[in-house]
Amino acid sequence: MRQLAKKGNMNERIDGVLRKFRSRMTSYPPGMCPLALYRSLLQVSINQSCGKCVPCRDGLGEVDYLLKTVLYGDADEETLSLIEEKCRMIAATADCAVGVAGANLILSSLSEFADEYESHIKNHRCVENVTQTIPCVTLCPAHVDVPGYIALIKEGDYAGAIKVIRDKNPFPTACAMVCEHPCERKCRRSLIDAPINIRGLKKYAVDSVSADTVPTPEKNVGTGKRIAIVGGGPSGLTAAYFLSLMGHSVVVFESHEKLGGMLRYGIPEYRLPKARLDQDINAILNTGNIEVRCQTKIGRDIPFETLRKDFDAVYLAIGAQLGNRMPMENAEAKNVIPAADFLQKVAHGEPMDLTGKKVVLIGGGNVAMDAARTAVRLNAETIHVFTRKRDDYTALQSEIEGAMQEGVRFRTLLSFLHIETNKDTGAVQAVWLQPEIVGQYDQNGMMTTEHSSNYPYRFKCDLLILGVGQRSDVESFEKSGIPVNRGRILADEACMVQGIDGLFSGGDCVTGPSTAINAIAAGQVAAYNIDEYLGYHHKVHLETAIPKSFPNPCIPTGRAEIEEKDPVERSRNFDFVELPMTHEEAMREAGRCLRCNHYGCGAMEGGRGE
């Protein structure tokens, strides 16, 4: 018994080491040499080897040596062939998964990072621009100076923090409410305890000082240039903000009665109160030089050719606001509605009374979760969410958990077969679902499924919501000769539309449905490239000094989370669900920041317009 206790104790200690190792992998910084990463992962496989079979015991070590020669610039093309040959042999002959997984890891690197291998062999260095960067700044699509505004929050300068955010992102309030916070994904604080609650701190700043009371930077001297922006959502308004500060005149054409795009008409009030969104929009319009023409649709009210003639440049930021329907019989039946259309009806003040109704929702993204939680607030009797695969749940985990707490029921491994309608009313009365079983993963690492031997079954419903994506309204633009492929405008990373001088496009109408921060980033890129196209190189000056940094003692400290109202209370109305962070929580959370912009990381990445 004494020996068993010792083994148990040893296993617990090893588990503790592995937990620490996982935190190191989680916080692996962007911009590092991928070949060095793959070699470190290969060495993990070597350390896991039991040593019984030669391919794993000796072969992985030989591959490690060859990788070392590549990293040190001592390899040639023959070395790569030798690495591939040895890895294929190990994958085919190793006795267990340790050797197979290790060899396949390196084989995948040969294809995924062929340019890195070539650069190390020919130039004896990493490819150009590969350098360690600050994770939170790099992973923020808009490249906001996260450590800078956290330092200002710590100093109690909330207006200064808003100015720093606005230096790259003119929607500090909206992003504080709904951003998916990719900046937290590789926070180096994970090495110690948990990532900084960056979104929570941003929310504390805008809760402390209204964004529209914080002055925007001084405008540059007027240039006399006029830019038309089609679409008043996050991407279009971001471009308008920066172009206005550069001294250009901007006219925003918006088809809805108010600005905001999907921030206003796609995100429910309980997640983003529209009065708070208006604070950001007011601040943007306060820069001046921005004229707004709402309820004006290009292609219907004004020909696109008129914009090309009357303006020096045009930016198309029309978003992706049309909900998709599934290509099947009865997809247009009564009470079958795309999730995006359902949310827009509610936002326009046309909510359905779902009292006593059974609601079925197909899809697992953030829009689907918004629709499900909105149905709860419209008093639906039951809401069931169905997906075919487990990894179809792409919504934020917090959104899925919130829906579960509010009574939404989830089922997976069910493929959608067809819609059954009532012969008399033409309305949906049931959906037919086919049970699935999991299969192999595809080349993208996604789970595949196949039909189970279980029979399809019928599920009654009174309302069917289709959360299966959105598309852009590009028909009129395509008729005007703008290049479109599969419903998306063809534009490059500089937001320049292919083959049309002076025409730019970005956001969801180019990439497909994405996040608000990605749309904001596209608007920023477009603004700076439009400015360059017009022959200028303006800069927007940050009028706030970042506090001096001091080393962090790295004492493990719990992460302060944003609390929410009780699920029963919040599900009864559309009131905002999140509770304010206290001053003590915010100060402690801001104090956890390691100030990676000065300590332990590389240079700031992501200049304006890059």
Image: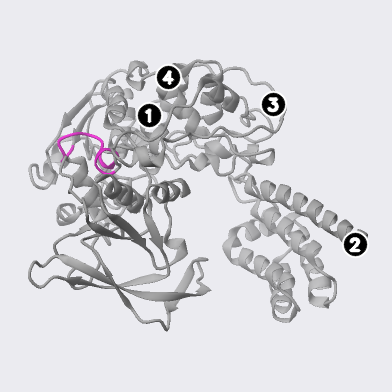
Q: Is residue 125 magenta?
A: no
Q: Which residues are magenta?
A: 254-266
* Numbered tag placed on residue 301 in the rendering: none
Mark 1 vs 3, N-terminal side: 1
- Mark 4 belongs to which amino acid? Ser
Q: CA distance from mark 2 to mark 1?
A: 60 Å
Which of discs 2 and 1 lies nearer the camera? The answer is 2
* Numbered tag placed on residue 1 in the rendering: 2
Which of discs 2 and 3 lies nearer the camera? The answer is 2
Q: Going by the image, does 311 lie left or right of 404?
A: left
Q: Residue at x 38, y 70 (%)?
A: 414
Indicate the quadrant where residue 135 lies: top right
Q: Residue at x 59, y 47 (%)?
A: 128
Q: Secondary structure at mark 3?
A: loop
Vertical arrangement, residue 486 with respect to residue 601, above or below: below
Mark 4 vs 3, N-terminal side: 4
Which of discs 4 and 3 lies nearer the camera? The answer is 4
- Mark 3 belongs to which amino acid? Asn
Q: CA distance from mark 4 to mark 3?
A: 25 Å
Residue 208 position within the rendered picture, expressed as x and y whole percent measured from the top left: 42, 19
Indicate the quadrant where residue 358 lies: bottom left
Residue picked out by circle 4: 208
Q: CA distance from mark 4 to mark 1?
A: 11 Å
